[in-house]
Image: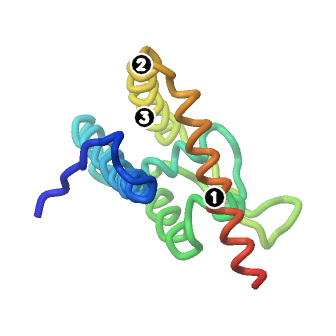
Amino acid sequence: MPDTITPYDPRQEISQKYRTVTRQIERLHRLYLDVIRAELGRMHVNDINAVQALLLTNIGDAEVNVKTLMERGYYQGSNATYNLKKLVEAGYIEQFKSPNDRRATIVRLTEQGMTLCQQILDLETAFAEGFETESGGLGDLLDRLGGLEHAWSHHIRVCAMS
């Protein structure tokens, strides 16, 4: 069955609106991965997948502790380890032991990784500029989604304590 988007109906009950939002967030994430996948195909990049390409943008121009990537909630341990290994093999990142804590692994983009990261950021900028002209812009949307993230995080903490 194709993934269809239920149009927003202002007469919906509040719980139905909430369910529609949560389902749309999930669909948007999958769709965004498809956007990245299509862009990688357009650029003839076939040695990494969309999740790995987004991992490059999460690292950016910093040297990042692998544990930090997991703590930020981007990746779970085994997923991060697998994806980082693939990115090292493909030449997009390099990893090394932290000089301050030999147990910690640090990653940073290679020149190849920085180039691809910049291409993805350029794509994101083009999309962002299109949305910024819409009423409310991305700032309002970001505020609303941030509130939802805060509520969900708070609920998880409360449940963990009970």
Foreground mark, 1 or 2? 2
At 62% from the left and 45% from the top, the residue drawn is 146
Give the numbered dot on residue 95: 1
136 sits to left or right of 159: left
Answer with mark 1 or mark 2, whichever residue precedes in sequence: 1
Cβ atoms at labels 3 and 2 below 8 Å apart: no
x, y percent for residue 138: 52, 27
Q: Earlier in the sequence, mark 3 or mark 1?
A: 1
Gap between marks 3 and 2, in whole Å?
A: 22 Å
Please tell me whether residue 129 is drawn above or below residue 36 in the rendered image. Answer: above
Q: Which mark is residue 134?
A: 2
Where in the figure is residue 39, as x and y percent of width and height?
28, 38
Q: Is residue 142 left or right of residue 52?
A: right
Q: Is residue 7 above or below residue 48?
A: above
- Label 2 environment density (alpha carbons within 10 Å; few <14, some 14–19, many ≥20): few
Could you tell me which residue is drawn at 50 percent across and 58 percent down? 88
User: Which secondary structure, mark 2?
Assistant: loop
User: Which part of the image, by quadrant, shows the N terminus?
Assistant: bottom left
Amino acid type shown at disc 3: Ile
The residue pinned by badge 3 equals 120
Marks 3/1: CA–CA distance: 21 Å
Residue 124 visible, this orientation = yes
Q: Is residue 49 visible in the rendered structure shown here?
A: no
Q: Nearer the viewer, mark 3 or mark 2?
A: 2
